[in-house]
Amino acid sequence: MHLKIGELSKKTSCSVLTIRFYEKEGLIPEPERTEGNYRLYDVGYVERIKFILNCRTLNMSLNEIRQLLTYKDNPKKNCSDVNELIDLHVSAI
């Protein structure tokens, strides 16, 4: 199942402009495109954007989110830095 950017925006409650910004910043990978150059997102993007939005709710910077996503994408990496980062933000709540 593929979603166009407007559909992805509705499913994630994230604006189209913000989705494009996250793509530009490398927080979400560049999606497939149709012959008409429309972006096509699979359902994995919904989860990823919701994860980013949750991180933003914790006042995480884009660099911190990028770091977390690196560990999310490579789960075999040593995640001691991630635990420290999460603890820091959770304690601030």
Image: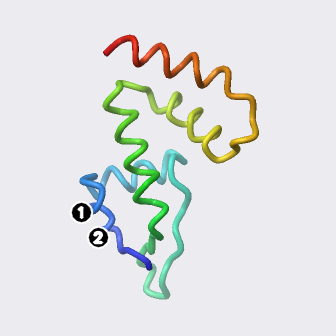
Q: What element carries label 1?
A: helix
C-alpha span from label 1 to label 2: 5 Å
Quadrant in which the N terminus appears = bottom left
What colouring style does the render use? rainbow
Name the one closer to the observer, 49 or 5.
49
Q: Is residue 49 left or right of residue 44?
A: left
Residue type at numbered disc 2: Glu
Q: What element carries label 2?
A: helix
Vertical placement of residue 24 versus 68, above or below: below
User: Measuring 39% from the left and 11% from the top, which residue is drawn there?
Assistant: 91
Q: Where is residue 54 in the image (x, y as percent from the top left)?
A: 36, 37
Vertical placement of residue 20 versus 61, above or below: below
Q: Are marks 1 and 2 in contact (CB under 8 Å)?
A: yes
Q: Position of residue 87 (x, y in %)?
A: 49, 16
Q: Position of residue 8 (x, y in %)?
A: 33, 65
- Image quarter of residue 20: bottom left
Q: In this view, does 76 lie to the left or right of 60?
A: right
Q: Position of residue 84 (x, y in %)?
A: 57, 16
Mark 1 closeness class: few <14, some 14–19, many ≥20 residues within 10 Å: few
The residue that mark 2 highlights is 7
- Image quarter of residue 30: bottom right
User: Measuring 35% from the left and 41% from the top, which residue is drawn there?
Assistant: 53
Vertical placement of residue 12 versus 1, above or below: above
Name the one closer to the observer, 73 or 5.
73
The residue that mark 1 highlights is 10
Quadrant in which the C terminus appears = top left
Which dot marks residue 65? none
